[in-house]
Amino acid sequence: MSASTDSSLIVEQMAAEDHVQQIELLTSTNDDYDGVVVEMDQPMDSTTFVIILRASISNWKQQGKKGVWIKLPIHLANLVEALIKEGFWYHHTETKYLMLVHWIADSANTIPANTTHLVGVGALVVNEKKEVLVVQENSGRFQGTGSWKYPTGLVDKGEDICVTAVREVKEETGVDSEFVEVLAFSQSHKSFFEKSDIFFVCLLRPLSFDIQIQQLEIEAAKWMPFDEYAAQPFMEKNEFLRYINEIYLAKIDGHYSGFTPVSTKSKFSNYQNSFLYLNVGGLKRCNSL
Amino acid sequence: MSASTDSSLIVEQMAAEDHVQQIELLTSTNDDYDGVVVEMDQPMDSTTFVIILRASISNWKQQGKKGVWIKLPIHLANLVEALIKEGFWYHHTETKYLMLVHWIADSANTIPANTTHLVGVGALVVNEKKEVLVVQENSGRFQGTGSWKYPTGLVDKGEDICVTAVREVKEETGVDSEFVEVLAFSQSHKSFFEKSDIFFVCLLRPLSFDIQIQQLEIEAAKWMPFDEYAAQPFMEKNEFLRYINEIYLAKIDGHYSGFTPVSTKSKFSNYQNSFLYLNVGGLKRCNSL
C-alpha cells in the first residue's frame, strides 16, 4: 500500500470545471466503523501529498466516510506537519510509525481512545519448603537497598499475562515454572508520565530449582524462606506487599481463591481465543474446597 | 518551559576552538533514571532548533545523561522531521502532543515501553428481583441485532476501574449504582490495530431504578429478568458471556468470590493511594461465608 506517483495509486477521472482532470487518490482500506485506513509507504514531497490528500478526503466524504486514519512510518516524518495543518491529530504511535487521525463527517467524533495502560506482572514463585524465589535488581527503586523482591516485568505487545509471568521468572532467574493464578491486581495512575498501569500479582509453581541469573538486570537471586522474606524492613512501609503476604498465607491455608485463566472465544466471536481469568473453584461450587 | 531565543533558554559560556562562544541550550528537567525531559513550547524554525538541540545533547552527554525525552505540542509539528533526522524516535502520543525519545549513552537502551492496553469494563447491575439492567446500542457490533447487553465502556485517562463502571451505568441508563466486585477479566489482543485490551466484568448493586437513556449512544434500556437475558440467542455463540452468566448464578448461590477494591498506598510508597483488587472474603479466612 504505497502512495506516490507509482502504479499503486488509484487514478480516477473526475469532472471539474468543465474539463476532465486526472486526480490521484491515496490507496485506502475500509474499517468496520465507516472509516478508512491509509498506510503510507513511498517517499513523497509534502506539497504533492497535500494535493492528493485533499482530493482523497473529498472522495471519501462523497462515499460517506467519517474517520480517516493515516499510518506514517518514521521515514515519512516530513509529512507530519502537512497532516497537522490539514486538521489531523496524533492518535497513537509505535517506535517506527505514527498514526494520525481526522474526523471528516459533520456528526460527533467517535474516534476510539488511544491505549492508556501499561500492564505489569509480579511473580510469586514458592517451592514446597515455603521458600520464595527472590531477586535483587541492578537498577530501579530497590537497587542498592539490599531488598529481596519477587521478579516483576512488563507484558510485551500481544503477550498473555500468564505467559509474561513465566517468561520473566525464566529470564531473571533461569527457573522454569507454571502459572497457578492471579492473586490480586492493582491499578495505579501517573506511574509514567500521564499513563496508568495495572499490575497483576501472580502465583507460580516452580518446575526447576537451579538459579542462573540474568546479568544485565539482576544482581542476585535466591530461594528465601517466606518468613524471612516477609520480615524484611521495607515491608513495614509497603502496605501493598503486606497485603500480598497475607494473601499468600491465606492461600496456603486453603482459604483464598484467585483468578485462573481459561481459554475462551473472545467476547466478540470473530476474534481469536483469549484468556478469561476467573475464580474457577467458586464456579465449580467450591468442589475444590 | 520554552525553547526559543527568549530569556527562558539557558545561556552558557562554552570554550570552543580557542574562543568563548555563547551557546543556547534547551531547558530541561531531570527524571529519576539519568534522563532529561524537554517540554517545548515556543515556535522555532527547524534550522535554529537543530543547532540548539545538538549543543544541548553534547552538554547532556558531558553530564552523563542517557535518555532524552522531547515533548512536542501539536503546534510545533514542524520540528518532528528534524528530531527524527537527529536520531529520535516516536515514544507515545496524546491528541495534542507527541513524545519523542533518544538514547544518547553507549550503554544498552533501557527506555521504558509505551502503553500497550486499552482497559474496558462491563457492568452487570442486578436488582433484588433478579432483573439485569440491559441496553441496546446505537452503534457497534450489536447494533440492530435486537440483542440486550449490559453497559460497557472504556476507562478514561487516570480513572479507577470501579469508578468507570458506576459512571458508565449512570451515563447510559441514568441509574445510580455502587460497585460490588470484579467477577472476572479477559485479555484480548489486536482488538484495535496492534493494541490489546483488558476487560473487567464487574458486579454492581443498583441504588436507583428509573431509567433515562443517553440518546447519543443508547437506543433503549430496561430491566430484564436474568433468565430471559441469559436465554438470548446470541449467547449461544458467545462462550465469554455464558461464563459470566454461570459466574453470576454461582454468585447468588453464595459460592463465588470475585475481587473487591481496597484503597492502599501504591506498591511504590511515593505514589498516591491506589486500589488493590483482591478476594477480601478469602483473606478474612471465609468469615463472610
Image (cartoon, coloured by chain):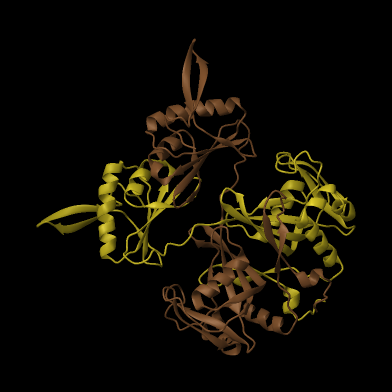
Chain colours: A brown, B yellow
Would residue B194 be found to the left or right of residue B5 on screen?
right
User: Residue B132: horizontal and vertical position, in percent?
Assistant: 83, 54
Residue A272 versus residue B160: which sits nearer the camera?
A272
Residue A7: percent from left, percent from top: 46, 29
* Residue B205 seen in the current view: no
Direction from residue B66 to residue A229 in the image, left or right: right
Looking at the image, residue A66 lies above or below residue B244: above
Residue B7 is situated, as x and y percent measured from the top left of the image, at 28, 50
Q: Residue at x 51, y 78 (%)?
A: A173
Q: Is residue A43 left or right of residue B161?
A: left
Q: Residue at x 43, y 77 (%)?
A: A143
Quadrant of res A274: bottom right
**Nearer to us in this view, A154 or B78:** A154
Where is A12 relative to B121, above or below? Answer: above
Looking at the rendering, in which quadrant would you find the C terminus of chain B? bottom right
Name the residue furthest front. Answer: A7
Identity of the residue drawn at 82% across and 52% down: B236
Q: Is residue B28 left or right of residue A110?
A: left
Q: Which sits in the foreground, A248 or B73?
A: A248
Residue A60 vertical position relative to residue B138 in the rendered view, above or below: above
Q: Residue furthest top?
A: A18
Instruction: Tally the marks.
Output: 0
Q: In this picture, is B118 found above or below A161?
A: above
Picture quarter containing residue A273?
bottom right
Pick the front one: A103 or B105: B105
- Whether residue B86 appears in this view of the structure is yes
Residue plotted at (51% across, 85% down): A222
- Across and down, in percent, residue B142 comes to 75, 43
